[in-house]
Amino acid sequence: MSNERRTPINLVVLGAPGAGKGTQAVDFARRHRIPKISTGDILRDAVQRRSELGQRTKEVMDTGGLVADELMVAIVRERLTRQDSADGWVLDGFPRTVAQATALDEITVGQGVLIVVDISVPDDALITRLARRRVCGQCGDATSVAAGEAVTRCARCGGELVLRSDDTAAVVRERLRVYAEATKPLIYYYASRLTFRAIDGQQSQPAVAAALTAAVDDVLAAVSVRISVSEGAAG
């Protein structure tokens, strides 16, 4: 895709825990030279900036509470107005609810096309994938260990590889239940839109990356055709 584009690429990546949305969001943002913005990044940045929103966020986080939709939306709104977002952005972890999605629609009015791509992976495959995931206790890199494979050290830094406590089968099932209950309705919210696509997340990482790029290109082409037809009809 050419770096010369008429409209920004505003991309929301959806997917259940373990679907690979974080990895793909980082890769896509890097290749397109736009910021990858996650909810964790936004919250930490807000606190570090010591703004009014940051202070309110810190108070909630310090007490172990969940950041309310209203506050989360306000923080996202502020983040997306910064200069580095002028050519677009990739959102990972927001929106998480239909209420947040409705707010994002309002935030992005007049700021280009909002593209939503769901990385789809069946629950059974996610449970198996996460059970094989090991994270380096030193550098944080994640790797997949095949069944019966005795890999205990990180290939990058030599640190010890560990199974995250939230990657055990019982915890993963609960995370998937919560996702289905709270976040999966987003798919139904977006599914009928011209700018929504679903891709197969069971492929290799490079194949998923190619599918994500193809999905974005397809949306931009479809939107361009619709705009051209509308302008022709108006003329």
Image (cartoon, rainbow, N blue to C red):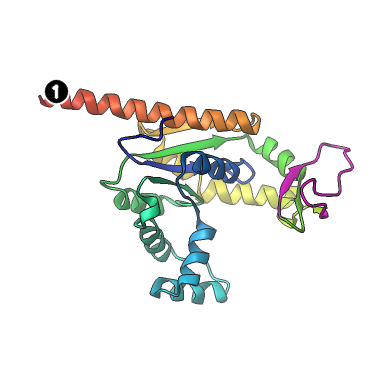
Task: Please identify the quarter of the rendering in which residue 138 is found.
Answer: bottom right
Residue in the picture at 34% in, 57% down: 81
**How many neighbours does mark 1 have within 10 angstroms: few (below 14), some (14-19), or many (20 or more)?**
few
Task: Please identify the quarter of the rendering in which residue 193 is found.
Answer: top left
Q: Between 11 and 8, which is closer to the camera in this rendering? A: 8
Q: Which residue is mark 1?
A: 233
Residue 200 can be seen in this image = no
Residue in the picture at 62% in, 31% down: 206
Q: Quadrant of the N terminus?
A: top left
Q: Is residue 51 left or right of residue 148?
A: left
Q: What residue range appears in magenta?
A: 140-160
Residue 144 magenta-highlighted: yes
- Residue 135: where, in percent of width, then height? 75, 51
Residue 118 can be seen in this image = yes
Residue in the picture at 56% in, 48% down: 179
Q: Main secondary structure of the magenta part?
A: loop
Q: Is residue 145 left or right of residue 71?
A: right
- Residue 109: where, in percent of width, then height? 27, 47
Q: With respect to residue 93, does 121 lie above or below?
A: above
Mark 1 secondary-structure assignment: helix
